[in-house]
Amino acid sequence: MIPEIEEKTERVKRMLSHENLGGVLLNAQHNFAWITGGASNGIDLSRENGAAFVFVRSDGKRFLLANNIEMPRILSEEVLAKDFEPVEYSWQEEKASNNFVIEQAKLLNGGEIASDIAIHSGTRVVERLIANCRYELLPAEVERYRKLGNDAGKAFRGSIDKLKPGESEIEIAVKLRTELAAMNVNSVVTLVVADERIAKYRHPVPTENRWSKTLLLVTCAKRHGLIVSLSRIVCIGAVPDELQHKTEAAAFVNAKLLSATKPGATGAELYAIAANAYSERGFADEIDRHHQGGAAGYKTRDWAAHPKSNEVVRLNQAFAWNPSITGTKVEETVIVTENGVDTITTSKDFPMIASIVDGREYHSPGILQI
């Protein structure tokens, strides 16, 4: 783990030097996971902030700041004292002042202290700068990410095998979450929608609506801080021609995006490619009904492609595109490599739609007929 943490620390050091900062506090759960190589400071998962801080000083020295409730477990189960020097304080002191952690960091460094999330009104928030440090995945992260994608794809397929017609969307969501949990994967987004509801909503939270014909399942699955996104459609009996046609069109948009997701491409350029692809397939207005996805990693989306986006694709960056046409959707997670994108979330024995762009074949999930 040490080489990974050292490289990430160097990235933060360069950012601190460029911004003339004395150090930065990392408290957001996604950033804590990133800087520690997959550890967690999460207790209350409804919040962005975690129960401990990593403080990176401008000279590269790393500290773990936590109260006496959290420090023993975090040092025992999450991070090593040799990688992050512990700074422990009483929970009473922490609760007594909103500025307490900032003051602790200032004792470790005399320069200006920034943070990744707002701790108090006088602190500069540098989340966007930290995000730039996160984008290019290191080899160890790529390995963990591939394993997560593989396990998520398996779990998704396994949950589908356990589904029964007539089950409610809520019951189906429980099965999907359970299958993922068995692989130590947490579904941070779980969308399940059946039949007529599919065409009504782009973000369909599960309801008591019962499945009779067509089912769309979506998850954003998290482990060690990394998150993959994938969607699957299941149909009982013959797939309706309109659904097949729309899904193939969405797969074409996905293929065009995958082909164009290369180092140096901007979010605005990728959006334009998606817009043209929708138009080419006769669904020009569909791009207005939902975002197309974008960069992924330690957040479900670090940034989404849109007409004014100046974000730039990086080598070894993760992306999850999710083109949709009313009533259908395709979605996988990929990593940008020197040889193009590599999909990491495929499900075994699941139908695929092949689309050819510039002589290369790209695959998107099709519709499983049962």
Image (cartoon, grey):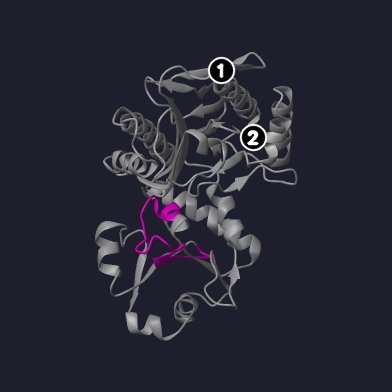
Q: Quadrant of residue 29?
A: bottom left
Residue 270 visible, this angle = no
Q: Quadrant of residue 256?
A: top right
Residue 103: image location, x then y, percent:
48, 80
Q: Is residue 150 magenta?
A: no
Secondary structure found at label 2: loop
- Cα distance in 3D space between marks 2 and 1: 37 Å
Residue 278 visible, this angle = yes
Circle 2 crowding by C-alpha within 10 Å: few under 14, some 14–19, many from 20? some
Amino acid type assigned to the residue bearing label 1 in the image: Asp
Above or below, 120 against 194 in this view is below
Q: Which residue is mark 1?
A: 241
Residue 197: image location, x then y, percent:
51, 39
Residue 331: image location, x then y, percent:
52, 33
The numbered dot on residue 368 is none
Name the residue: 55% across, 38% down.
319
Name the residue: 39% across, 50% down.
37
Magenta region: 33-59
Q: Which residue is mark 2?
A: 263
Q: Nearer the viewer, mark 2 or mark 1?
A: 1
